Image: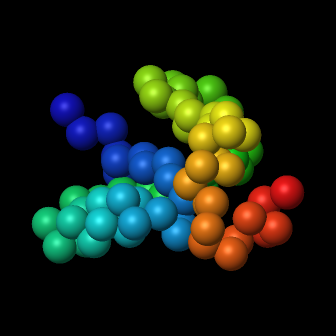
Amino acid sequence: MSEGPLRIVGAPGSPYSRKLRAVLRYRRIPYAWINQGSPETHGLPQPRVHLLAAERAAVDALLAGTGCEHLFH
């Protein structure tokens, strides 16, 4: 049943990815970490949910009054 270590694709800075790696280490489950966007991801299944693109108006509404508007324009 075992085909070697579990292959995990993720971003190193993602809180979800970090939590998943911590659980795998804690439970001593062998895994191979693959950075998102690296050549090793070619041929692997694509995620069911892709990142959602935010509309400009939605971003403007979120940033209104924060003083950070100039960083994203």
Q: Is residue 26 above or below residue 16?
A: below
User: Residue farthest to the left?
Assistant: 27
Residue at the spot 21% in from the left edge and 66% down from the top edge: 23
Q: Residue at x 25, y 63 (%)?
A: 24
Residue 34 visible in this rendered orientation of the protein: no
* Quarter placement of the N terminus: top left
Name the one closer to the observer, 66 or 38. 66
Q: Position of residue 33 (x, y in %)?
A: 48, 59
Q: Is residue 24 visible?
A: yes
Which coloring applies here? rainbow
Report which quarter residue 50 is drawn in.
top right
Task: Single out the residue that lies furthest toward the right.
Answer: 73
Q: Residue at x 43, y 49 (%)?
A: 8
Q: How many marks?
A: 0
The location of residue 28, given as percent across then percent down, is: 19, 68
Q: Is residue 1 above or below residue 60?
A: above
Residue 38 lies left or right of residue 23; in this view the side is: right
Does 60 appear above or below 24? above
Q: Residue 65, percent across and down? A: 61, 68
Extreme residue in the front direction: 65
Which residue is more in the foreground, 53 or 67? Answer: 67
Percent position of residue 39, x then y:
73, 45
